[in-house]
Image (tube, grey):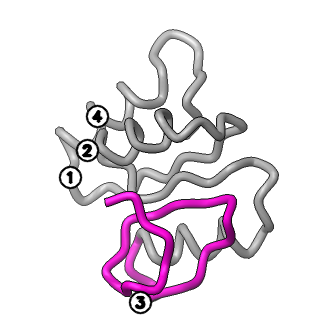
């Protein structure tokens, strides 16, 4: 999901998706690095927010943590995700 999308922005789409299907793991992949977008996306129900210029392994790890396949991983400084591992940069 991206922040900027036609018709419906990604933050509102995430809010609607997670309201109807709370088990759905929404992961943002965006060029917008503004912390305001990150926090809004996570508050809307996204489980991760990755910048488009992040390393490939950050996207793979964020998806794995978000859907429960990975118990924890270390993100780079270019990504954020909700986690309980305590080691990761988190925007809870």
Q: Main secondary structure of the magenta part?
A: loop
Q: Residues within 10 Å of mark 3 (few under 14, many from 20)?
A: few
Range of residues picked out in magenta: 67-92
Mark 2, residue position? 18
Mark 4, residue position? 15
Rendered-image quadrant of the C terminus:
bottom left
Residue 76 location, quadrant:
bottom right
Which circle's residue, 3 or 4, is located before the other in the chain? 4
Rendered-image quadrant of the N terminus:
top right
| Figure check: 89 above or below 21 | below
What label sits on residue 86 in the rendered view? none
| Figure check: 69 above or below 3 | below
In 3D space, how far apart are the residues under numbered discs 1 and 4 (Cα atoms)? 10 Å
Tally of marks: 4
What label sits on residue 71 in the rendered view? 3
| Pointers 1 and 2 in contact (C-beta within 8 Å) | yes
In 3D space, how far apart are the residues under numbered discs 1 and 3 (Cα atoms)? 19 Å
Q: Is residue 23 magenta?
A: no
In 3D space, how far apart are the residues under numbered discs 3 and 2 (Cα atoms)? 21 Å
In 3D space, how far apart are the residues under numbered discs 3 and 4 (Cα atoms)? 24 Å
């Amino acid at each position: 999901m991206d922040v900027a999308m036609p018709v419906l922005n990604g933050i509102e789409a995430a809010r609607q998706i997670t309201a109807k299907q709370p088990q759905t793991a929404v992961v943002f992949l965006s060029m917008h690095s503004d912390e305001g977008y990150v926090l809004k996306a996570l508050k809307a129900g996204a489980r991760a927010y990755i910048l488009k210029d992040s390393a490939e392994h950050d996207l793979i790890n964020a998806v794995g943590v978000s859907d429960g396949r990975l118990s924890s991983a270390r993100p780079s400084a270019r990504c954020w995700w909700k986690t309980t591992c305590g080691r990761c940069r988190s925007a809870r």
